[in-house]
Amino acid sequence: RIPQCVCVRGEFLLLLINFPYLRSTVRPPHIVFILADDLGWYDVGYHSSEIRTPNLDKLSAQGVRLENYYVQPVCTPSRNQLMTGRYQIHTGMQHQIIWPCQPYCVPLDEKLLPQLLKEAGYGTHMVGKWHLGMYKKDCLPTRRGFDTYFGYLTGSEDYFTHERCYDIAPLNLTRCALDLRDGEEVAAAYKGDYSTELFSQRAVSVIKKHNSSKPLFLYVALQAVHSPLQVPERYLAPYSFIEDRHRRLYAGMVSAMDEAVGNISLALQQEGLWDNTVLVFSTDNGGQTVYAGSNWPLRGRKLSLWEGGVRAVGFVAGPLLEKPGTVSRELIHISDWLPTLVGLAGGSTGGTKPLDGFNVWKTISKGFASPRQELLHNIDPLYSDLAPSEKNVSLRGDICHTPVKGNADSSSPDRWAKFGFNVSIHAAIRSSNWKLLTGYPGCEVWFPRPGYNGSDSGVPKLGPLKPIMLFDVEKDPEERNEVSAQFPDVVDYLLTRLQEHQKTALPINYPDDDPQCDPGPTGAWGPWA
Ligand SMILES: *[C@@H]1O[C@H](CO)[C@@H](O)[C@H](O)[C@H]1NC(C)=O
Ligand SMILES: *[C@@H]1O[C@H](CO)[C@@H](O)[C@H](O)[C@H]1NC(C)=O
Ligand SMILES: *[C@@H]1O[C@H](CO)[C@@H](O)[C@H](O)[C@H]1NC(C)=O
């Protein structure tokens, strides 16, 4: 019989089984996901930066640049949503990051992206930063879907020694210890190797060892370009024109990262995988201006819910895109990758908890409208700005306002009560062109373009922040014109939506440090429970 292609997934598979000649034509693609750390909006060549990223520019020019693409404002949350396809409020991880001694991880009843791809027949490999919890072995990447792992479990280490220093509060001591593992074993032999090169070499070796008859999932979570600002001298040579020493170091780090991406894509080509590869590049959050990142001209930075914290550099590359060489301005979020990639893999998301992400493949590949109309940036009742301490602050003005106190618009104190949402809470939500922020969103400054030498500081004078702010981020991506007074209906609607989301939130899980985490003077950070 002639098959009617009403392609519910199960039926489609049945068709493939009945028509073996079709089977060979549908090969699940290799999926390579490269996540940069703290790369800012203004820190790629194709956003007119003074930093040169020829590989990112070229790959994205031949692929699809995502210019209305969002991530979470900080590390663990973005990675959490990438791996689960679910908002932070649904895993109890809406507050901050996982610190080295906190005894928790992404809940073990969450099914992660690599598990789903493994079920779909993929070989799954991870290189780089995990940061999704490691207090017990069940939390490790190798126990959560990755066949192999090479990388570090926490964050902020030294690029050469691979040590992480952390103040263990209950022990009243600062411990510096190694954080690098090959599989589950401590990897002590790489002292002195610059991590951007180390991780790209490992990624290349995974690609070279891979038997291409099996689909590959490779997740490369680079250390670059997170602080500390460290880079081998040779990457600095092109940047002698940058006067600010921190920005110069940072630019060199970006160049090393760009070279890593170039090396990985070259290996895919050399090994004959590229023709059937989907490569995704994304940052995990906005740039950290304190460490010379830049999100110009966007407002705010890493750790804030302003566009500078959450609007991300991202693109998709590879020959499977049906409209290569285009720019997507459709709303896409990091939680969308799980359903998108599992869909591409021909896998099933049936085993997950209810997803907050959407399958956006047709949006990316064919330019269709995004299925995503709304985006919950976060709701975090415990928020406080994690601005680094004064001694680390660069010369660039660090002049964030202090948080707004009070939970109501003083002109009409009862105005917001009916929505049941406490507007002193740090939260933000996007719906089509509108973005509503409540509470203190984090550092609210428009940091000037790097190298700006104007007579004024380049930083506009700021009025006091309001507990409720509304922006039309399509027309006003820099969040300069606060319009809540002009659009009260939009405000009402979005406050209602925030309250509806908040009702579905799990209680925050953010335990105290466990002193048993201490690896001792010669140990390495790792599972202790
Ligand atoms: C922590 O150690 C410092 C330096 O040894 C000491 O001055 C301080 O009193 C200690 N604090 C506590 C709470 O034990
Ligand atoms: C990229 O590959 C070249 C050639 O093998 C190597 O010299 C360079 O160190 C690699 N760069 C990175 C960042 O791994
Ligand atoms: C790759 O895998 C296929 C299928 O399992 C096998 O037939 C083939 O020998 C493998 N190739 C190599 C080089 O191992």
Image: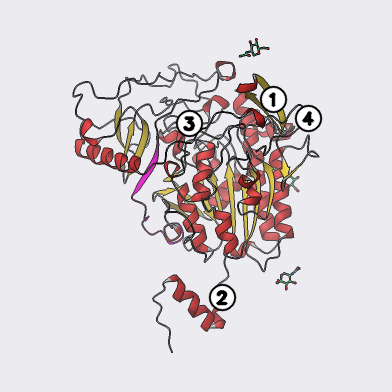
Above or below residue 458? Residue 233 is below
Q: Please give the residue where the numbered disc 4 appears in the rendered image.
A: 522
Q: Quadrant of ligand 2?
A: top right
Q: Please give the residue where the numbered disc 1 appears in the rendered image.
A: 175
Which of the 4 image quarters holds residue 480?
top left
Q: Please give the residue where the numbered disc 3 appears in the rendered image.
A: 303
Residue 308 drawn at (x, y percent) = 45, 34
Which marked residue is nearer to the observer: mark 1 or mark 3?
Answer: 1
Which marked residue is nearer to the observer: mark 4 or mark 2?
Answer: 4
Q: Within 10 Å of the Cα at label 3, are there few (<14), some (14-19), or many (20+) other Cα atoms?
A: many
Task: Give the residue displayed 50% in from the left and 20% down from the top.
Answer: 453
Would residue 364 be counted in the magenta stretch?
A: yes
Residue 158 drawn at (x, y percent) = 69, 31
Q: Within 10 Å of the Cα at label 4, are there few (<14), some (14-19), or many (20+) other Cα atoms?
A: few
Q: In this orientation, which residue lies closer to the viewer: 270 or 183?
A: 183
Q: In this orientation, which residue lies closer to the viewer: 469 or 231?
A: 469
Label 4 sits on what residue type? Thr
Residue 77 drawn at (x, y percent) = 50, 40
* Colour logic: secondary structure
Bounds of the magenta segment: 363-380
Separation of disc 3 and disc 2 at Cα?
A: 45 Å
Label 2's element?
Answer: loop
Q: Is residue 8 left or right of residue 519?
A: left
Q: Please give the residue where the numbered disc 2 appears in the rendered image.
A: 25
First in sequence: mark 4 or mark 1? Answer: 1
Label 1 sits on what residue type? Arg
Q: Within 10 Å of the Cα at label 1, are there few (<14), some (14-19), or many (20+) other Cα atoms?
A: some
| Residue 207 appears anywhere in the view | yes
Q: Is residue 186 left or right of residue 338?
A: right
